[in-house]
Amino acid sequence: QFTNEDYELVKKDIPNIDKISGRINVWRNNTVSYKKEYGNYDIIACHPGYGYYETLDILEGRFINDDDIKDFRKVVIISTIVRDALFKGGEEPMGKFIHVSGIPFKVTGVFSDVGGDRDMQRIYVPLSTAQRIFNYGNKISTIGVVTKDIDVEESRAMTEDVRQTLAQVHKFDPNDQRAVFV
């Protein structure tokens, strides 16, 4: 189980990271609603860097930013499928409040995802906000990184650096390939 401290450690100590994000899939009540419209969607809590991992095309507004994380903002970025399901008659979603598991979040972005319909049935919220609202404490399920422009050998060395760093903190054998999936 990763923590915010693991995220900060990897971010600070591992060279050649271009973008980094923690992630939590919120598995609890995934009902998202606006007025009388509702649906169940995947709720992804993440840092701003996560937008670089996915093939997101921000159509309106923006993705999660550093201020959202720092200030525990209740903002949400919705897919076009979620927008079309919740906002009928062409109503503009930007700046409106939708309910995520019964809690109001302000829509600050709409995205399209070239990954297909399944990937489009999701929303993004700031990781720090989700940790507080959904009682995850300081837990993170995944830490993902995008490397700078490095070659394969540098990438392998970076992988080993991450494994060694996390092995020291979590007391596992860095040679145990099952302890941390990279």
Image (tube, rainbow, N blue to C red):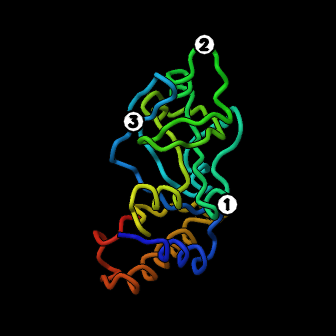
Looking at the picture, which amino acid does disc 2 mark? Gly
Instruction: Identify the residue under disc 2.
Output: 89
Mark 3 neighbour class, 10 Å CA radius: few under 14, some 14 to 19, many 20 or more: some
Please tell me which residue lies in front, 6 or 145.
6
Please tell me which residue lies in front, 16 or 60.
60
Q: Residue furthest right?
A: 61
Residue 84, image x, y percentages: 55, 21
Mark 1 neighbour class, 10 Å CA radius: few under 14, some 14 to 19, many 20 or more: few
Looking at the picture, which amino acid does disc 1 mark? Asp
Please report contact status of discs 3 and 1: CB closer than 8 Å, yes or no. no
Query: Regarding mark 2 in the picture, which secondary structure is present there?
Result: helix
Residue 167, image x, y percentages: 38, 82
The correct choice, above or below, for 66 with respect to 32 in the image is below
Residue visible at 50% across and 61% down? 22
Q: Residue furthest top?
A: 89
Q: Tell me the tag on residue 170.
A: none
The tag earlier along the polypeptide, 3 or 2, is 3
Quarter of image, res 12: bottom right
Q: CA distance from mark 2 to mark 1?
A: 33 Å
Q: Tell me the tag on residue 31.
A: 3
Residue visible at 60% across and 12% down? 89
**Quadrant housing the N terminus:** bottom left
Instruction: Identify the residue under disc 1.
Output: 66
Residue 133, image x, y percentages: 45, 56
- Is 85 on the left or on the right of 137, as rendered? right
The tag earlier along the polypeptide, 2 or 1, is 1
Please report contact status of discs 2 and 1: CB closer than 8 Å, yes or no. no
Looking at the picture, which amino acid does disc 3 mark? Thr
Residue visible at 47% across and 64% down? 143
Residue visible at 67% across and 62% down? 149
